[in-house]
Amino acid sequence: MFLMFLDKKQEAVVAGAFAEMRRLVAADGPDAFVELRVGGQPFETTIGDLTRFPHSVLATLWQQHRMSTDPNGPVRVNGDPGLFHLILNHLRCPEELPIVTDVSQIQWLEREGTRYCLDELTQQ
């Protein structure tokens, strides 16, 4: 969707990065689990869920981690762990809004959705 704003060279670089991510996901398997450390707290999800939106910051962090010299530890995310489970719920079921209990959680989701480039979440 955002590729229309890129020139041909930039578009090729982005397409190459997405192709590499698809290759890495296929190599590990989309159902393989990956550990995340968000603000120091552990979370776990599947590679398929984490990379569901390949343009997102979370997918990019996984790809960078996977291609690093030490891909065995957790993917470190500099974020607020308090409601991060809502982001993971969105990645698991993107067609449904995560269940929130108050307006502040909606505001948090909007902010974090923007921060992680989860346009699908912020548009909902």
Image: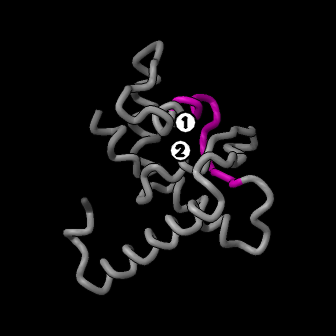
- Could you classify mark 2 by the number of other residues whose Cα lies within 10 Å: few (under 14), some (14-19), or many (20 or more)? many
**Mark 2 or 1, closer to the camera:** 2
Ranked by sequence position, the earlier of labels 2 and 1 is: 2
- Residue underneath mark 2: 49
Q: Quadrant of the C terminus?
A: top left
- At x 67%, y 65%, the residue is 66
- Residue underneath mark 1: 88
- At x 40%, y 29%, the residue is 107
Tell me residue 60's x, y (percent). Answer: 53, 62
Q: Element at badge 1?
A: helix
Q: Is residue 99 left or right of residue 5?
A: right
Q: Which residues are magenta?
A: 75-86
13 magenta-colored? no
The type of residue carrying mark 2 is Asp
Q: Element at badge 2?
A: helix
Q: Quadrant of the N terminus?
A: bottom left
- On screen, 21 above or below 59? below
Tell which of 120 and 78 is nearer to you: 120
- On screen, 42 above or below 28? above
Residue 106's disc is: none
> Does the residue at mark 2 contact the one at mark 1 (Cβ under 8 Å)?
yes
Specify the quadrant of the image occupied by residue 63.
bottom right
Q: How many marks?
A: 2
Tell which of 7 and 79 is nearer to you: 7
